[in-house]
Image (spheres, rainbow, N blue to C red):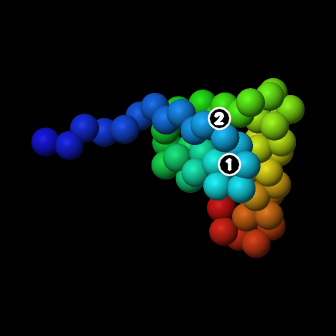
Amino acid sequence: MPREIRNVAVLGAGTMGHGIAQVAAMAGCDVALVDSTSALAEAGLERIRHNLDEGLVRGKV
């Protein structure tokens, strides 16, 4: 029987990483987004915030 995934760690907050983290979080998972520096991780979080804001404006979220 498959197990439910509840916790996700994404290594790298760049082009794909922040998107993977966003999708996992929107699916209800607890997500740890990690990059080589805290500045890069924060930039990934900012991209996620921007994506969510855009989604709200367009009625997609």
Question: Which quarter of the figure has residue 39?
Answer: top right
Q: Residue at x 83, y 42 (%)?
A: 43
Q: Residue at x 73, y 64 (%)?
A: 55
Question: Which quarter of the figure has residue 58?
Answer: bottom right
Up-down: is 23 above or below 42? below
Can you give x and y, in whole percent of width and height, for residue 18 in the image?
Answer: 68, 48
Up-down: is 35 above or below 18? above
Q: In the rendered structure, are the residues bearing label 2 and label 1 in contact, judged by CB atoms less than 8 Å apart?
A: yes
Q: Quadrant of the N terminus?
A: top left
Can you give x and y, in whole percent of width and height, for residue 46 in the image?
Answer: 82, 45
For the residues labelled 2 and 1, the Cα–Cα distance comes to 8 Å
Q: Residue at x 52, y 47 (%)?
A: 24
Question: Which quarter of the figure has residue 10?
Answer: top right
Helix, strand or loop for disc 2:
strand
Q: Residue at x 81, y 27 (%)?
A: 38
Can you give x and y, in whole percent of width and height, for residue 49 in the image?
Answer: 79, 48
Residue 28 located left or right of residue 52: left
Crowd class of label 1 (few under 14; some 14 to 19; many from 20; radius 10 Å): many
Q: Amino acid at mark 2?
A: Leu
Q: Amino acid at mark 1?
A: His
Asked if residue 59 can be seen in this view, the reply is: yes
Sequence-first tag of 2 and 1: 1
Can you identify the residue that label 2 sits on? 33
Q: Looking at the image, which residue sits at the far bottom? A: 58
Residue 52 located left or right of residue 39: left
Can you give x and y, in whole percent of width and height, for residue 41 in the image?
Answer: 76, 35
The numbered disc on residue 18 is: 1
Q: Quadrant of the C terminus?
A: bottom right
